[in-house]
Amino acid sequence: MTIHEASAIHAPAQLHALKVRMRGWAAELGFQHLGVSGIDLSAAEARLLQWLERGFHGEMDYLARHGTRRSRPGELVPGTVRVVSLRMNYLSPDVRPAQSVLDDPALAYVSRYALGRDYHKVLRRRLQQLAQRMQDEIGPFSYRVFTDSAPVMEVALARQAGLGWSGKHTLLLDREAGSCFFLGELYTDLPLPIDQPTGEHCGTCRRCIDVCPTAAIVEPYVLDARRCISYLTIEHPGSIPEPLRPLLGNRIYGCDDCQLVCPWNKFAGTAQVEDFAVRNGLDDVSLVALFAWSEEEFEQRLEGSAIRRIGHERWLRNIAVALGNAPPSEAAGTALRARLDHPSALVREHVAWALARQTR
C-alpha cells in the first residue's frame, strides 16, 4: 500500500477524531492553538505579487525567486491538500519590560522573540513530534513541517485556519493572544476537516502605523520592508541608509514597536516552554558591553540563538548605529574608537558615522 492509498482509507469521522486528538497533543507540546486550512491562497497570491512589484521586499530576492510555490502549497509539496497551522507563545515571563529598555539609550534592545533559543529549532522539533504521534495513531501519511524556513505564506494560512486575522502591521492577531507568538505549519495529504477564518478586529485603530519609527507601514496591511527596522538590522546585508540610522534608536536586532502599542497584546500570553527563557541577559545589557564581544565570543554566546544568523559583522554594524544614537559618553567613544580599524569596511563605515555623532 502506498502512502497516498493509506491516507485515502481514513473516513471523515476518523479524521475528525484525529483532529481533536491533535489539539490535545499540540497543547502537550507547548502550542497554544491548532487549526486546519485548505490550500487556496489565490487572494493572498495577488496581494503578494502586487507587493513584490512595488519593490517592498528590498534585497530579499528569494521572495520573488520562489514564484508561486509560496502561494500554492501543492506546488511546494506535491500531494498537499491541507495545511495544519499552529502557534506558540514566546514571551518569557521574567523578561524586562520592553519599553523600559527602549527608554534607556545606553541599553541594547533585542526583539522579544529572539531573547531565547532559536525558534526554528524549537518549533520544528515539536512539529515533528506531533506528526510522529499522528503516525503512531493512524499509520504512515505524507507530510512536511515548516517554521519560517521555506516559501510558505504562514500568516495567510494561519488566518484561513482560524488562528487570527492579519493586522494592519501585517502580523497575525488574535483577540485572546495578541501577536506575540510563533507560527509553524504541517503540510499533509490527509483531508482533515477545515476550520473557518475569524473576523477582523482592528477597526479604525492605527496605533501600529503611527508608532513605526521609520514609517515602514506605508498603508494599512502594507509594509515596505526597506524601511522596516527588523529588515534593516537582520535581513539587510549592506550599509544602513544614513537618513534611517537615527530612527533606529537603540534597536540592534529587530523591532517590536508596532506590537507594543497594539491594544490586543494586553492579552498576550507567556511561553510555556523553557527554550524561550532569556539568554545572555539580552533583555538588560549595555551597548558597550555587547560591542566588545569578539567574533569568537559572539559565536559562542549566541550558539542556538536566531541572532547568530546575522553574523558578527552585522552585529557590530547594528550596535555601532545604536551607539551613535546614544548620548555622548566617554565609554561609548572609547568603544567605537577601538573598532575604527576593523577589517570590515561595513563596520568601519558605521563606526565612523557613530563616532562623529558621539563627538558632535
Image (cartoon, rainbow, N blue to C red):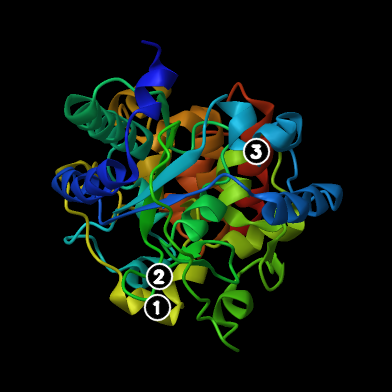
Q: Position of residue 236 (x, y in %)?
A: 65, 40
Pointer 2 residue: 174
Give the position of the N terminus as an image quadrant. Answer: top left
Pointer 1 residue: 264
Judge the density around disc 3: few (<14), some (14-19), many (≥20) Cα neighbours within 10 Å: many
Q: CA distance from mark 2 to mark 3?
A: 25 Å
Q: Position of residue 77 (x, y in %)?
A: 55, 26
Pointer 3 residue: 72
Q: Secondary structure at mark 2?
A: loop
Question: What amino acid is labelled 3 in the image?
Answer: Arg
Q: Earlier in the sequence, mark 3 or mark 1?
A: 3
Q: CA distance from mark 1 to mark 2?
A: 7 Å
Q: Position of residue 143 (x, y in %)?
A: 41, 27
> CB under 8 Å between callouts 2 and 3?
no
- Position of 21 with respect to 306 (left or right) is left
Give the position of the C terminus as an image quadrant. Answer: bottom right
Q: Secondary structure at mark 3?
A: loop
The one of 70 and 296 positioned closer to us in this rendering: 70
> CB under 8 Å between callouts 1 and 2?
yes
Question: What amino acid is labelled 1 in the image?
Answer: Trp
Judge the density around disc 1: few (<14), some (14-19), many (≥20) Cα neighbours within 10 Å: some
